[in-house]
Amino acid sequence: MPDAPTPPTTGREWHLLSRPVGWPKPEDFALVEAEVPAPGEGQVLVRNTYLSVDPYMRGRMSAAKSYVAPYELGKVMQGGAVGEVIASNAEGIAVGDHVLHFFGWREYAVVAAENAVKVDPDAAPLSAYLGVLGMTGLTAYAGLLRTAAFKEGDSVFVSGAAGAVGSQVGQIAKLKGASRVIGSAGSDEKVELLVEEYGFDAAFNYKNGPVSEQLRAAAPDGVDVYFDNVGGDHLEAAIGSLNRGGRIAICGAISVYNNTEPAPGPKNLARLIQTRGRIEGFLVGDHYDLQPQFVREVGPWVRSGELKYRETVVEGIENNLEAFLGVLRGDNTGKMIVKL
């Protein structure tokens, strides 16, 4: 049996130095060398292999009250990560095991055993546990099936459809019998990907013209479900095309995350009276009870290739910030991952 690796004494980690105003700037952050402590009782030391960067992290950089505590200034940030245990002081987790945890933005993490979930690198690539089989996948599953109450025969519109969540929403809807799935994305290449690889019935580049007009052309019979990752003009367009009894699940609003002034709301909310439609926001953290069902249903789709996924992989922790900014710009296709 090979010897366990010698635990390091220091490792690099990203700190938030100041709260960004508008678009985050490099000077708001610092990559610092920090001490790596030995794991205490009930803890493990993890050498992170992959880190996740996600749009919600922009909100945690603000001091505004939200559903999750803001990042502390001068302290290491957090995020999803998967890695290998290189030292263990906890029962049930051994050196060499791979775990999923929430202490990303760093090379090494000391994690309490109850906050580490063992994952099998033979069942799926490690990076998949941050995306298609991880939090983003469960977000798509819970938002579509529970919050939006999708049912067979529904017509579904997804914004940010080439992203990690949106691409999975559209494919799950198709696999479960949607009558039509429409997606929006920010480039012609992504539009082609949605139709040719992910099996969407129609897709459009929101930069090519008014969203409301493009949506009406793509969904002439209206939409029953809108899964919103973008907000702004996409939300207004979806309300305008919503069928009677339509449902809108609000997952994110990336179009307004860096605004310094409040964005105007949709001007056509009164249409919800006519359609008897509803809008509901949701957080994946409220739906972890669906995790076993999600893995049972989606895992086989991933393994069989029925549900396809893409990852945009950025190499090196020194590029973690740029990868995050890339998510805000829409540079990624599928899940944005940082490989250490």
Image (spheres, grey):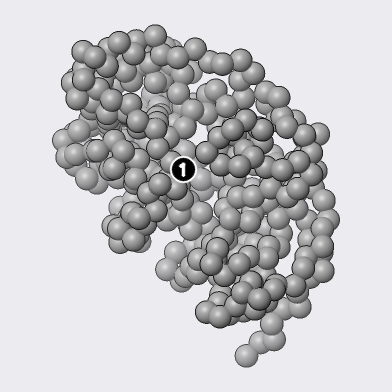
Which residue reaches farthest bottom?
1
Percent from the top left, x then y, of residue 313?
59, 49
Q: Which quadrant of the figure contains the C terminus? A: bottom right
Percent from the top left, x then y, of residue 136?
45, 47
When the figure is inspected, residue 177 is found, relative to residue 94, above or below; the finding is above
When the figure is inspected, residue 46 is found, relative to residue 311, above or below; the finding is below
The residue under the point 64% across, 50% down is: 78
Q: Is residue 223 visible?
A: no
Q: Secondary structure at mark 1?
A: helix
Q: Is residue 3 visible?
A: yes
Locate residue 120 relative to residue 320 in the image: left or right: left
The residue under the point 69% across, 39% down is: 322
Q: Residue type at mark 1? A: Ala
Locate residue 254 relative to residue 239 in the image: left or right: right
Q: Which residue is mark 1?
A: 164
Percent from the top left, x then y, of residue 72?
72, 43
Q: Which quadrant of the figure contains the N terminus? A: bottom right
Number of marks in picture: 1
